[in-house]
Image (cartoon, grey):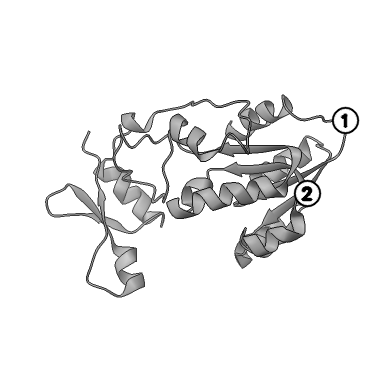
């Protein structure tokens, strides 16, 4: 599974004989934190989580919830504090303009020998100009991920892609209907069939302008 492979990678770089302080940014339901607790990692875990519903779920895990977004003001209390900062499929939900500053804040939060573990979709926009299904805000390839981690801040120990490439993915009408029923998004195809129209954006901004997302016609 994804978490098992992530833990295997991290095991290669951490000293499990000593206690560690771990921060997860974008914990969701806390699956990773639950997994490391089951494996008896000697970790004191923290999350930045502003959403109340997520905070309620995380109460069932031994984790310190900081009820704020990951930001410059809050991180002042956690400078050089964490042994590991972990992000799994959350960095792509940050705006492109926020990536550089977010990476710098992560570096400030880490101890000098700390580890930043980050997994994102391998969505090279040269090959896949648009994602039709998941409304991510930022997109990464291996090369762009390297660019996002300044060499004066980070020494990259491991970087690799795995799984199905986005360029091989095909979005079918059945998939759109199924995901729409699950509430993952509220899109419909444009009349020419070349775009997905984001209806939620229309409702949120109360405007007649629709943001167009290219629909993959592979």
Secondary structure under the numbered disc 1 in the rendered image = loop
Give residue 127's position: percent from left, percent from top.
30, 32
| Residue at the left extreme of this rendering | 192
Residue at 60% x, 25% y is 158
| Residue carrying label 2 | 81
User: In this rendering, would 187 be left or right of 103?
Assistant: left
User: In this rendering, would 217 be left or right of 163?
Assistant: left
User: In this rendering, would 96 be left or right of 116?
Assistant: left
State whether residue 59 appears in this view. no
State whether residue 14 appears in this view. yes
Marker disc for residue 17: 1
**Foreground pick, 12 / 98:** 98
**Foreground pick, 149 / 70:** 149
Q: CA distance from mark 2 to mark 1?
A: 18 Å
Residue at 51% x, 33% y is 146
Q: Quadrant of the N terminus?
A: top right
Give residue 31's position: percent from left, percent from top.
65, 45
Q: Earlier in the sequence, mark 2 or mark 1?
A: 1
Give residue 74's position: percent from left, percent from top.
69, 63
């Amino acid at each position: 599974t994804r978490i098992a492979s992530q833990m295997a990678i991290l095991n290669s770089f951490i000293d499990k004989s000593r206690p560690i302080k771990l921060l997860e940014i974008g914990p969701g339901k806390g699956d990773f934190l639950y997994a490391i607790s089951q494996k008896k990692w000697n970790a004191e875990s923290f999350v930045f989580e502003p959403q109340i519903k997520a905070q309620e779920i995380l109460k069932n895990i031994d984790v310190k919830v900081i009820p704020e977004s990951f930001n410059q003001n809050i991180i002042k209390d956690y400078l050089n504090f964490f042994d590991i900062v972990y992000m799994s499929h959350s960095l792509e939900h940050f705006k492109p303009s926020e990536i550089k500053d977010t990476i710098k804040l992560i570096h400030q939060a880490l101890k000098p020998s700390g580890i930043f573990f980050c997994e994102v979709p391998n969505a090279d926009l040269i090959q896949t100009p648009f994602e039709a299904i998941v409304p991510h805000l930022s997109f990464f390839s291996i090369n762009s991920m390297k660019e996002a981690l300044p060499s004066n801040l980070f020494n990259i120990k491991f970087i690799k892609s795995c799984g199905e490439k986005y360029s091989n993915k095909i979005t079918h009408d059945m998939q759109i209907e199924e995901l729409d029923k699950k509430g993952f998004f509220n899109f419909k195809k444009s009349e020419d069939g070349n775009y997905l129209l984001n209806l939620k954006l229309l409702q949120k901004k109360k405007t007649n302008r629709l943001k167009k997302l290219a629909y993959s016609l592979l």
